[in-house]
Amino acid sequence: MKKIRILEDEEGIREELIILLSNSGYLPEAPSSFADPVEDILKAAPDMVLLDINLPGMNGKDILRELRKKSQIPVIMVTSSDAERDEVITIGYGADDYITKPYNPTLLLLRIANVFRRMGGSEETVDIGGVLLNLRKSTLIQKSGEEIVLSKNEMLILSYLYNHRGRIVTRDELMTDLWNNSEYLNDNALTVNISRLRGKLSEAGIENIIETRKGQGYILEV
């Protein structure tokens, strides 16, 4: 299990990240004190750091600059600033990626997976009901080894349901997530995409894994 250290001073966001990462198969660590952040990171030896730029005391860019003198731990910067200058400076200091608040949870998880993949530290597949989902190729891998290609919308829907598995996801949540990923779907189009996704899951040998909760939404049971 990959350990991700969260350096975020806003308690609410910190708690949301802990829940999101825990539900996605990571081991989050989120200190509330930032007295000696660089040494704390080195002692904790995480697999990745989510680092807010605007921290009390030593800011995130300075932490990153000092950390890079001693370690190449993957770092994704999280900030409320849209300034391109911040992004350029941050990447120049050695950040592996950059995301701006308010961020889309699915997009953040995809960026985490992408960074791990580039570093050679993450599997490209996740198990969904006994069938492998290839995150890089957007395919379902059948037990025979044959692959079923998912459309972008189908992949986004399945990823969101997987990242929130075990709880009801509303249709509005799914449409908002698709909108945030530059894919607009109306209510009818969402129904069509869910139906097509179910068909491909069934073809892969997974039956009734996406359960409809009338008047509430969907739940992925894995």
Image (cartoon, rainbow, N blue to C red):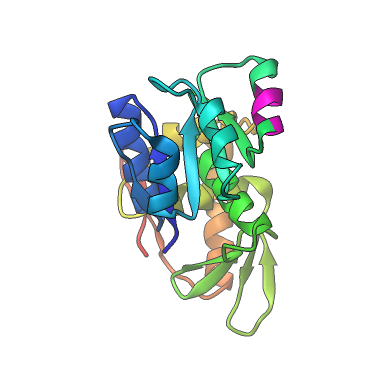
Q: In the image, what residue occupies the spot 30% across and 49% down?
A: 167
Can the viewer see residue 164 in this picture?
Answer: no
Q: In the image, residue 171 lies at what x, y percent?
A: 43, 37
In front: 36, or 113? 36
Instruction: State the image quarter where residue 13 is shown.
Output: top left
Q: In the rendered view, tell whether residue 207 sits above or below residue 108.
A: below
Above or below, 190 against 55 in this view is below
| Badge count | 0
The secondary structure making up most of the magenta span is: helix
Q: Residue at 45% across / 59% down in the picture? A: 2
The quarter of the rendered structure image containing the C terminus is bottom left
Q: Over which residues does the magenta segment extend?
A: 87-92
Snapshot quadrant of residue 186 = top right
Which is more toward the observer, 96 or 142?
A: 96
Q: Is residue 3 left or right of residue 117?
A: left
Rendering coords of residue 17 (x, y %): 37, 39
| Residue 58 shown in magenta | no
Q: For residue 66, say whether it is visible.
A: yes
Q: Is residue 61 above or below residue 218?
A: above
Question: Which quadrant would the N terminus be assigned to in this image?
Answer: bottom left
Q: Viewed as shown, does residue 218 lie left or right of 132?
A: left
Q: Position of residue 173 (x, y in %)?
A: 43, 34
- Say whether residue 164 is left or right of residue 111: left
Q: Residue at x 58, y 62 (%)?
A: 121
Observer-nearest residue: 157 or 187?
157
Q: Quadrant of residue 211?
A: bottom left
In the image: residue 207, left or right of residue 81? left
